[in-house]
Image (spheres, rainbow, N blue to C red):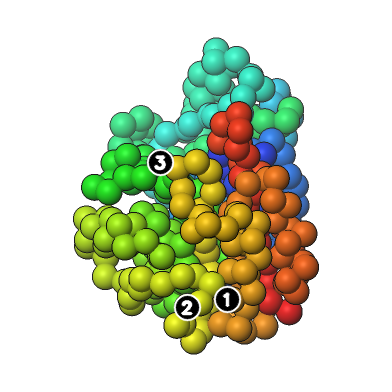
Amino acid sequence: MAKLFFLISGENKTLPLAELLAILEAEKYEFCITEKLDQVIRLKAEKKSINSVYLRSAYTRVCALELFTCEPTEEKIINNLNKINLTSVLNEQESFAVRIKRVRNYAKKSVVMDLEKKIGKKILQNTKKTRVNLSMPDKIFVGILTSGKLIFGLNIATICPKPFGERRPRKKPFFHPSAMPSKLARCMVNLAHAKRNDLVLDPFCGTGNTLIEATFIGCRTLGLDAQRKMLEGCKQNLEHFNITPEGLILSDARKHPIIKTNCVITDPPYGRCCSTMNSTTKKIVKMVLFSVMSLLKKGDRICIASPKSIHLSQVGKTVGYKHIESHFVYVHRSLTREIAVFEKQ
């Protein structure tokens, strides 16, 4: 196994790390966590696992092969650079750049720029016939300043969050104020351990965000909704991204015609802008958890969102699921979402 590190988003305290680990678990990679730092996770895993994280993750920013970790002093950094065999990652005639990133305020900008220059100079000294190219380098060395340490390595993949912004609810042809952000929808797909060719069911498909994000990682998708208007809007959004689902069905999620699925990912209606079909959100959540249980095999997962006030984790355990984890996402003053993951026992 290789020594790897990942720079993760700081936009939620728990979701980014949970998503990263869920991807590794879903893709059946063995891994061993060596250290958790502020927005950085160090672990041992197969190097090829980075490709799965790159293709799937919403909240990971950088995936790298670790070369060393030390206190962020010039002396310690230079000593570590002298110890490692840089020619194993940087060949003759290859160009390189050094990028130092700081998490929050762990270092000043001037320190970052100074480190980049000094590390780049040392790499030039310790390798043969290499050159610096800041615009289009063959290799990028990346260092993260966090928690009083510098984690340094070879950048294998950088994940740009821009595509998620381009798929945000207001950018889609059909918009509804209850629509979940694309990034969070992708994260829920990952937390549910959805894999390529799995059938993902969303019994409250709404504008189709979950179906869209599941499709982009290679899943087959099936959506239900009790409102024709929402189903037609969902179809419009899917067509915008050239997505053909297994089906879109006008159906009450509590009395659906589905026989089986690999996982369930959903965000039931709640709030003033949503129709709860003359029922309370808690009753809807409980009934849909009951109704989809028969579709899942032992060990299959459901990832579901609801207001924090519902106490979703307790509801799921009452129904008979094993509660894996819960995360909380602040939306506005009157709404904090609980994102809960359950497993069929």
Q: Residues within 10 Å of mark 1 (few under 14, many from 20)?
A: many
Sequence-first disc among 3 and 1: 3
| Circle 3/circle 1 CB separation < 8 Å | no
Quarter containing the C terminus: bottom right
Q: Please name the residue that numbered disc 2 is placed on.
A: 256
Quarter of the rendering containing residue 247: bottom left
Q: Secondary structure at mark 2?
A: loop
Q: Residue at x 73, y 30 (%)?
A: 147
Label 3, label 2: how many angstroms apart (C-alpha)? Answer: 25 Å
Three-letter amino acid code of the residue under disc 2 = His
Q: Please name the residue that numbered disc 3 is placed on.
A: 177
Sequence-first disc among 3 and 2: 3
Residue 315 seen from this side = yes
Label 3, label 1: how many angstroms apart (C-alpha)? Answer: 26 Å
Three-letter amino acid code of the residue under disc 1 = Val
| Circle 2/circle 1 CB separation < 8 Å | yes
Q: Residue at x 49, y 58 (%)?
A: 277
Q: Please name the residue that numbered disc 1 is placed on.
A: 292
Q: Which mark is residue 123?
A: none
Quarter containing the N terminus: bottom right
Quarter of the rendering containing residue 295: bottom right
Q: Secondary structure at mark 3?
A: loop
Q: Residue at x 75, y 47 (%)?
A: 35
Q: Nearer the viewer, mark 2 or mark 1?
A: 2
Q: Residue at x 60, y 15 (%)?
A: 108
Q: Position of residue 282 (x, y in %)?
A: 65, 57
Q: Position of residue 80 (x, y in %)?
A: 68, 37
Q: Position of residue 157 (x, y in %)?
A: 45, 49
The answer to which of 146 and 258 lies nearer the viewer is 258
